[in-house]
Image: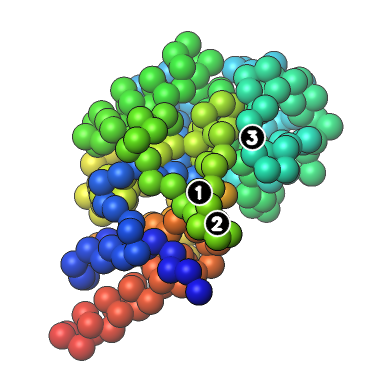
Amino acid sequence: MSHVPVCVLSSSRAPQVSHGHDLDRFVQIGSLTKPLTGTLLVRLAAAGTLQLDDPLERFLPVPAGTGITLRHLAEHTAALPRVPPRLRRLDPYADFDAGALDSVAQRLDSFTTGAPGGKEEYSNLGYALLGAALASAARTPYEELLHEHVLAPLDLTTITSNPPPDSRLIGRGFLGRTLKPWTMNGAILPAGGLWATPRDTAHLVTRLLVERRLGDPAPSWQTTGRLRWHDGATRGASVFAGAMADGTWVMVHRLSGQPLPTEETAARVLKDAVTERSAKA
């Protein structure tokens, strides 16, 4: 049985790094990109560039009358499918560029699954549209906006869509073969295309959820009881990050695209931290 590289950072114990993982090499963080996109939305709203309840059609060429707002996209209540149509099998987002997103936007009413504002339906497509709308509203490329309004204020400017190849940490598959990472620096970038070191990923969580350097957490974060969290998974990487209301936090990254063991590891760390705190009380 092969050993999956894992790193665990938390408020309750020293960093744990095993089987060749590395705190200072770049890894894909997948959908943990979404809270950064949501934070950008909130920051642009605070700056007066847009409003959270602006209709999507104000910024993108979508059919009139869909009723979809930027807030709906951020909260996954836009009644959109999880992924764009006609994706590749092995590298699903490689062809999903700005032109492909524009084509979907123009026919968006044919993809909706109901009226917006109802139940939550997790959607990568929704976040691709949200990122494009933010770029359109500010007339600035998404990643440039993200650095200016979110990453620079958090002092996390090394987080990027395209780290140097020799600085990347890549997972391995069957017989130890290196897994080619998914191509996610096109239109899907705002939904899941960022790379970060595990150390900076932990800083991202603490600075947004614990220290709250940019104000209240964005609506992109998931909430379970007193835990705010988000996860992410690509072909060869998975991550879980979250923080409790009392400031207890955890970040787990594994060089495996299977999210369940990553989530289970994070849950154990949080449970142990709560138990230890209760024992000391």
Q: Residue at x 45, y 56 (%)?
A: 255
Direction from residue 36 to residue 66 in the image, left or right: right
Q: Which residue is mark 1?
A: 178
Along the viewing direction, whichever of 179 and 271 lies nearer the viewer: 179
Direction from residue 50 to residue 269 in the image, left or right: left
The CA span between labels 3 and 2 is: 20 Å
- Give, as a three-letter code, the residue at label 2: Gly
Q: Which residue is mark 2?
A: 173
Q: Residue furthest top?
A: 139
Please state which of the two labelled residues, at mark 3 or mark 1, is closer to the viewer. Answer: 1
Element on which disc 1 rests: loop
Q: Place residue 151 in its image quadrant.
A: top left
**Placement of 68 over or under 12, stated as above or below:** above
Q: Residue furthest bottom?
A: 279
Q: Residue at x 44, y 47 (%)?
A: 170
Q: Decide: marks 3, 1 in contact (CB < 8 A)? A: no
Element on which disc 3 rests: loop
Nearer-N-terminus badge (3/2): 3
The CA span between labels 1 and 2 is: 6 Å
Nearer-N-terminus badge (3/1): 3
Percent position of residue 159, x then y: 33, 35
Q: Residue at x 47, y 11 (%)?
A: 139
Along the viewing direction, whichever of 93 and 136 lies nearer the viewer: 93
Q: Which residue is mark 3?
A: 93
Nearer-N-terminus badge (1/2): 2
Residue 212 appears in the figure:
no
